[in-house]
Image (cartoon, rainbow, N blue to C red):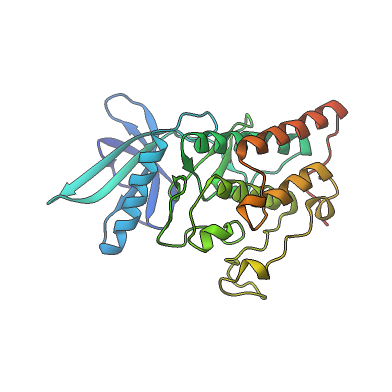
Amino acid sequence: MASLPIELFGHRVIAKIGTGAASEIFVVQDVKTKQVWALKHVVRVDDKSERFIDQVEQEYAIGSKLDHKNIRGIHKILRTKKLFTTTEVGLLMELIDADTLENLPLQNMLEAMKLFVQIARGLEHMNQRGFVHADMKPINVMVTDQKLVKIIDLGQACPVNHIKTRIQGTPGYIAPEQANRNPITTQTDVYNFGATVYWVLARDVIPTILPPQGDPIAVSAVSSSMLKLPTPLHIKNPNVSEDLSLLVQECIQMNPEDRVQGMVRVVERLEAITKSLCDTHIGKAVVGAK
């Protein structure tokens, strides 16, 4: 096991808490202010590393323009340069003591709904600021012990209507327009969000153009016309209301124009469903999909 660096960018390294495709995340402390942060560290190894450095730069460019309690705070970007080339970057971020939504055991539908509302509000804030997260999935949502949601990982985020040169997204969550390299819009977040809610309540991914690795039916990108919508949530999991099931189905339509129109409307409908649960004092278990 490699030893921890003692210091990075003038910050004392306390612990390593994660790894990415080409990054490592550490808990660090500013030696001057004693402030503790999470630091995402990427080193340029070769020319292929350039895109990972670019992703961190993009994450900072977008994250620094956001200010919402349900999105991880981005503080500062630090760079090391040699001969006008960036050789390493460090992204100082809010340190969050939490588990991911993927690993979180949910007690009942009301608890789940309150988390979904927070996620939707965070995405709504991003969209209103002119950006799309473009990689919403359970592992990119952290939930504290106080049930506060923090959306993380803006590495694939982009301005609204941006056209990416590479296919970026996660099988089981990726929207058709992402797989087809069409403009990424706020409707992309609507789709990714719907796929996330589906997984949380059904413990199953939806059929997407870019299927999961090892899928026995499709092993490469397929046409939207070949895909069918998944079994409605209220059939997969009887604890899910038909109202929520319908909302999710409307979020994951193949055509962006057929989806719920924007996260603002998604938030409104989620809040109405949550209020209905509160009014009827329903506390059904979440897990238990057929």
Q: Quadrant of residue 31?
A: top left
**In the shown orientation, is residue 143 left or right of residue 59?**
right
Q: How many circles with numbers are drawn on the protein?
A: 0
Left or right of 21? Residue 103 is right
Residue at the left extreme? 83
Residue 127 appears in view: yes
Q: Is residue 101 left or right of residue 79?
A: right
- Outermost residue, top direction? 33
Looking at the rendered image, the quarter that the N terminus falls into is bottom left
**Residue 69, relative to residue 241: is it above or below?**
above
Q: Quadrant of residue 171?
A: bottom right
Where residue 25 sits: x, y (%)? 40, 46
Up/down of 253 relative to 218, above or below: above
Q: Is residue 45 left or right of residue 239?
A: left
In the foreground, 26 or 113:
113
- Tell me where residue 144 sits by quadrant: top right
Image coordinates for residue 288, horizontal then vertical, percent: 81, 51
Quarter of the image with the C terminus in it: bottom right
Q: Residue at x 26, y 63 (%)?
A: 47
Residue 90 at x, y percent in the picture: 31, 43
Residue 127 image point, x, y percent: 52, 38
Q: Residue at x 64, y 32 (%)?
A: 147
Residues 78 and 276: in front is: 276
Q: Residue at x 74, y 53 (%)?
A: 202
Residue 108 visible in rendering: no
